[in-house]
Amino acid sequence: MAIRDFGLFCLICMVWGMNMIVSRWVFIATDIEPLFYAGMRFGMIALVLFPLFFRRWPSDLFKLFLISLCIGSAHFGLLFIGLANASASSAAVVGQLAVPFTTLLSILFLNEKVGWRRGLGIVMAFLGVIIISVNPSEFSVSTGLLFVVGSAFCASIGSILMKQITRMPGVHMQAWVGVMSFLPLFVVSAFLEGGEAGLGGQFMAFAQGGWLLWLATAFAVLGVSIFGHGSFYVLITKYDVSLLSPLTLMVPVWGVIFGVMLLGEPFTVQFLIGGVVSLAGVLIIALRPNTKLPFAVLAKKMVGSS
């Protein structure tokens, strides 16, 4: 890989890792609800990418809608609920379960064959997450991280469904996912969030949230989705998946670094052991590509990164 492209890839991973911290900050520093914020993010992505919406009409709108529900509404809705209740550092690592989940679903639905190395990687990925999530002194499990696990599973289902539709440029896929994701999130938010003020109260809270909240949202839309994914799609066309897949592990590493530095999140021995075990397992899977779904490790990044 050219030095310039490697530097760009490092910057992309840094932006994606920082976005986990920015999203966590939104939920601990403002009154914005997770599902509503996810809906706002997709609504703004749809608005920015709207010119691309009609350029490529998909052949199967229903399957694309299901994909959007999985990798858009469900994935980000659950992820943001998790971030509202768990540290960004731990969520950054636990979110990588999308990789072993996709491999397991490939075994069930695509007849993927898995050898002992990838099998070991799957076991290590889940074992590391268990180490991170369980509090041995209280025999309890972090509720927030359970939502993150659910978000990773939804993203994996979306990845499998993507195998069944005609491939389209990533940025066009992103435009369609944005258009199809924001309304379901707003509908669910209207029923579950905002109290008596309802959805209108959430919009008012966002409008009065101040420039830091608006800057955080602009970073998520323009920095993460437009710059990050747009640059990533370019690199995918230039380099083999087997080269890029392991490098995406820089994302949770940056997430942990920024979480400790900017949010003052704890970095315990338990977290270190669990993180190393889990990410080592993901790396093993990444180095042994999925033959039925070659983009399994990258699928989450291709359609939306936390």
Image: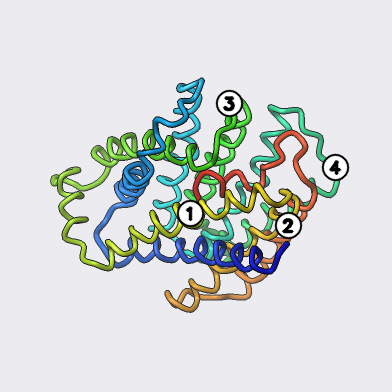
Q: Judge depth for marks 2 and 4 and give the one in front.
A: 2
* Circle number at residue 306: 1
Q: Which residue is mark 2?
A: 283
Please tell me whether residue 124 is drawn above or below residue 160 in the rendered image. below
Please tell me whether residue 115 is drawn above or below residue 238 in the rendered image. above
Local packing at callout 4 (Cα closer than 10 Å; few below 14, some 14-19, many 20+) is few
Q: Judge depth for marks 1 and 4 and give the one in front.
A: 1
CA separation in Å, label 2 and label 3: 28 Å
What amino acid type is highlighted by mark number 2?
Leu
Task: From the top left corner, tell me how far across and down residue 66 is, in percent.
Answer: 47, 28
Nearer the observer, 65 or 98: 65
Task: From the top left corner, tell me how far across and down residue 24 is, in percent.
Answer: 40, 63
- Residue 109 located left or right of residue 218: right
* Circle number at residue 165: 3
Instruction: Choose the circle earlier in sequence order: 2 or 4.
Output: 4
CA separation in Å, label 4 and label 3: 28 Å
Report the residue at 34% width, 34% height from top: 184
CA separation in Å, label 1 and label 4: 30 Å
Nearer the observer, 82 or 164: 164
What amino acid type is highlighted by mark number 4?
Gly
Instruction: Choose the circle earlier in sequence order: 1 or 3.
Output: 3
Secondary structure under the numbered disc 2 in the rendered image: helix
Secondary structure under the numbered disc 4 in the rendered image: loop
What amino acid type is highlighted by mark number 1?
Ser
Q: Which residue is mark 4?
A: 115
* Circle number at residue 15: none
Determine the residue located farthest toward the right in the rendered image: 116
Local packing at callout 1 (Cα closer than 10 Å; few below 14, some 14-19, many 20+) is many
Report the residue at 20% width, 50% height from top: 202
